[in-house]
Amino acid sequence: MRAAYSDAALDLVASVETYLTSGLFGDNSSVAGNAAAYYRGAARACALTVDLDPALVEEVDHPVLESLRRAYVDEALRDCMGGRDAAGGAALTSYLALRDRVLGESLIESGSGRAGVPGFLSRDEAPWLNDLLVRRFDETTTIDGARVGVTPVELTPELEGARSRSLNLARRSVPRLAADVFGGVRHVVLYRADQPYSGYTNAAPLFIFLGAATFEREHFAAELLLHESLHQKLNDISVVRSLFRPGYDDAKSVTVTVPWSFGRARTRHFAADRTFAAFHVYSHQALLYIGMAATAGTTEEADLALRNVVLSWARAAHFARAVRGDIQVEFGPDGRRLAGWLTRAVDDMGEFGLPDGTRLRDHREEFAGV
C-alpha cells in the first residue's frame, strides 16, 4: 500500500476500533462482566428451584468447569422455566459429576490463557477433558443438517507457533479490537474435520474451536480467531440484552436473504438470530483486513488484505441494508440499538478510499467472492 493509503487506513482503524470497543455493545470487559453476573444469578435461581445448595453451582476458577457450568445452567434454566424441574435438576447434577471429577484429579488451567491472548487447551494433563469439549462441539456442528465429524488433534510446536503468529497478526492489525475481543475467550480447542474450519457452540462457551488446517494460512487463522471470539462476545451480549421481541421463535422468524454460500450456487435465508451473528462478524472482520492492509510488509500481503476488505465489507453492508427491512419486527429494543450501532461502523468504513480511487461503498455488490 502507498503511504497515503496506509496512513488513511491506520486513521480509520484507530477511529472505528475505538467505536467498536466502547459503549453498551463494545466494551467487552463490561459485556463479559454482565454475563458473569447473569450466570451467577441464573445458577442460584435454578439451584433453589430444584432444592440444591446454591453454593454447589457457584463459579469455579477453572476454565473448562466454568464453560460446562454455564452450558448446564442454560439447560437447567430452560427446563425450570418450562416447568420441568426434574430435568433441570438432572442437568445440574450432570455438571456436578464433571466438577467432582475435575477437582478430584486436581486438574489445573492449561495453556497461556492470558487476557487477550487465548492459548490452546492442552491434552497433556487430561485428554478426556479436552476431548469432552471436542465431543460437545461435534454434537452441535452440522452442515446442511448432517454431522461434520470432528475429532481431537494433538498440539505440536508447529501449531503453537502458527497460533502465536496469527494472534500477533490480528493484534498488529487491530490492536485495541483484538485485545477487547480475545479477552472474552479462555482457550482455543484444536480439532480435525473436512469442514468447517472453525466454530463456536453454546454447549462449550468461553472456548473457540479451530481446525488444525486453519493455521496453514496465517491471515485466515487470524480472521477465524477473531470471528469465533466475536461469537462469544455476542453470546454474552445476548444473555443480558433484549435483542429480540418477546416470544421470538427462531424457527418462525422473518428471514434475510443471503446470496452467497462459500463456493456453492445457492441462496440461504437467515433468521434474526443468525443475521445478528453474521452482521456482527463481518463488520468487525472488514476492519481487521483494513488493518492488515495498512500494516502489510509486502505488496502481495497488502493486495490479499484489500481483496478481503472488499469482500468482508460488502457482506457487512448487505446485512446493514437487511436489518433496515422487514426483519426489524423480530428485534427487541436492544436489537434495534445493536443494528444501528453496527450499521454506523459499516457506513464509516464505507468511506474508506481504495488505491484504485474507489471507495468501499462503491463495492456493495461484491459480496459473493470466489
Image (cartoon, rainbow, N blue to C red):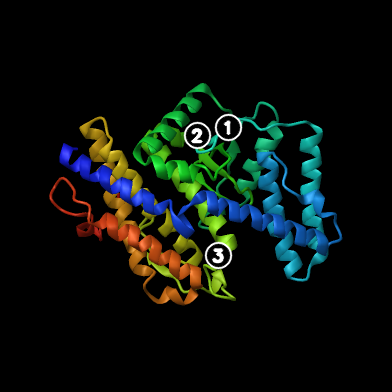
Q: Percent x, y for residue 356? A: 13, 47
Residue in the picture at 76% in, 37% down: 102
Q: Which of 156 and 177 is in front in this view?
A: 177
Q: Is residue 225 visible?
A: no
Work out whether mark 1 precedes mark 3 in sequence or the reverse, and give the earlier one. 1
Tell me the residue that label 2 is attached to.
Answer: 212
Give the residue furthest to the top: 157
Which mark identifies residue 153? Answer: 1
Q: Residues within 10 Å of mark 3 (few under 14, many from 20)?
A: some
Query: Residues at badges 2 and 1 in contact (C-beta under 8 Å)?
Result: yes
Work out whether mark 2 precedes mark 3 in sequence or the reverse, and give the earlier one. 2
Mark 2–mark 1 distance (CA, rounded to whole Å): 7 Å
Left or right: 211 with respect to 69? left
Q: Nearer the viewer, residue 261 or 338?
A: 338
Image quadrant in which you'd find residue 172? top left
Q: Residues within 10 Å of mark 1 (few under 14, many from 20)?
A: some
Q: Percent x, y for residue 229? A: 50, 46
Mark 2–mark 3 distance (CA, rounded to whole Å): 34 Å
Residue type at the position of mark 3: Arg
Which mark identifies residue 241? Answer: 3
Residue in the picture at 43% in, 57% down: 280
